[in-house]
Amino acid sequence: MDFLDYTLEELHNMLVNKKTTAVELMEAVYENIEKTDGQVGAFLELSKDEALRAAKEADEKGIDPNNVLSGLPIGIKDNIVTKGVKTTAASKMLEDFIPTYDATVVEKLREAGMISVGKLNMDEFAMGGSTENSAFKLTRNPWHLNKVPGGSSGGSAAAVAAGQVPVSLGSDTGGSIRQPAAFTGTVGLKPTYGRVSRYGLIAFGSSLDTIGPFTRTVKDNALVMNAISGPDKRDSTTYKGEVPDFTEGIEEGVKGLRIGVPEEYFQEHGEEQGVADAVKEALELYKELGAEVVPVHLPHTDYGIPAYYIIASSEAASNLQRFDGIHYGYRSEDVHSLEDIYVKSRSEGFGREVKRRIMLGTFSLSSGYYNAHFKKAAEARTLIRKDFDGVFEDVDILISPTTTTTAYDIGGKIEDPLAMYLSDVLTVPINLAGIPALSIPCGFSNGLPVGMQLIGKAFDEKTLYRAAYAYEQATDYHKQKPTFKGGE
């Protein structure tokens, strides 16, 4: 079965009407993985026996006709803990870690009837934009096997794009769902901070991290968000309000919707011409569909990258202190003192990018530099958030390119960290402001997918889905299939 040919609702109807079974769907997943993962490298760990057992139970119990997700497969990013299934965050530091509990999102998916098929590759501890920083394997873009799939959720995006699974979960700290979605022609949502529980997500930047879904279509994405959203007593940052049905009103169209276009997001960031042209063409289509498109300004956009990398790295330095060779995780064997355990375990267990960010964060938090760096970054964050608050008084959503370029060559930026960081210029301000953003495919440039970013007001994911659905129904970019060209 090619999951690229079916929506979640279509798969659900096939199960309800006995045209297939949950076991047959699960067998198809592992056939797809066996067929394509040698090229793509999306999965780090498979849970075949457990998944087939759960699928058999679902069939015996009977598929709930009122629960669209019942019996359907899903892949999980490897920084989301899964009870009894190895969870490494793609790091040598956690290469043998088997959690004793499930993340809240995993519990919620199980309650919804979904079945986890395995853990997906990523940049180590979610630090990177290409999934080249994994300690274990390289993930490739199904559209061109010599290109990166984006990061840090590259495995999650690639698995959906390749048709291995119909849906996956990723995490987004500075663009790690939206950028891979753009690079692979999939739909990826970074929810409002607090919309989805972070309990069981291995922390990178605690004030920035979010969990969200990758799917082929907008409505599929909304259906998964229905399942994973909501308050959690184990995560005090979750929103206590009622969770709406994100599919309700999704077909209402965009007539009368006011769309703001941030001029700062279309200039001076080295946008690939094909990317800018595809998004501008999409904006023209929105006008034809009845939306009003107006220019807006976000004057503090240029502070986003420096503010983000100081704040995120500072929080990472604090969060990763626990990996010390003592409590759990990797411990160096060539040690002769307590100091040796700390220094050698961390030096050998962490990769280059993780160590780089720990050093940057520790420096930014040090007593002599805190005011000059971390405090200034926090102040810039406030200005960026106020920019968004201001424009949302006049418009309903914002639209921009998700990324400045299409997927770049494997090895193209890994030796130039600054170039890698700068490629997040259009995504990190959203995390700093804590608001939702959705990336959907809107065309191609040089044969590679282009992503369009829809940015919304806090806790207004419904409007993003409505606007994205209207565009999706008027185009066929979401129906295009990857070519698997290139490769070694």
Image (spheres, rainbow, N blue to C red):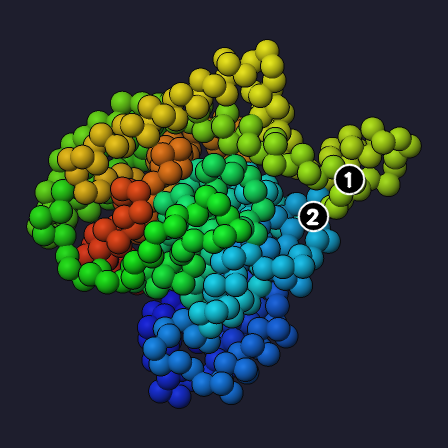
- Amino acid on which disc 1 is placed: Gly
Is 347 placed left or right of 449 in the picture? right
**Which residue ends up furthest to the right in the rendered image?**
336
Residue 221's place in the image compared with 355, above or below, is below
Q: Amino acid at mark 2?
A: Leu
Residue in the picture at 55% in, 39% down: 204
- Compared across the picture, whether 365 is left or right of 65 comes to right
So how many labels did they put on this image?
Answer: 2
Out of 329 and 128, give the one closest to the viewer: 329
Position of residue 103 measured from the top left corner of the image (x, y, whole percent): 55, 56
Q: Residues within 10 Å of mark 2 (few under 14, many from 20)?
A: some
Residue at 52%, 75% in the rendered image: 26
Image position of 409 with respect to 308: above or below: below
Q: Based on the displayed image, in which of its 4 quarters is residue 46 positioned?
A: bottom right
SS at circle 2: helix
Residue at point 59% right, 59% down? 102
Residue at horizontal 20 percent and vertical 61 percent from the top: 249
Asked which secondary structure carries label 1, the reply is: loop
Residue position for label 1: 325
Q: Quadrant of residue 278?
A: top left
The N terminus sits in image quarter: bottom left
Q: Picture coordinates of residue 307 (x, y %)?
A: 44, 24
Q: Which mark is residue 94?
A: 2
Left or right, 186 with reference to 389: right
**CA–CA distance in space, label 1 to label 2:** 11 Å
Q: Earlier in the sequence, mark 1 or mark 2?
A: 2
Q: Is residue 6 visible?
A: no
Question: Residue 468: horizontal and vertical position, in percent?
Answer: 24, 53
Classify mark 1: residues with Cα within 10 Å, few (<14), some (14-19) or many (20+): many
Foreground pick, 159 / 109: 109
Which numbered disc, 1 or 2, marks the residue closer to the eye? 1
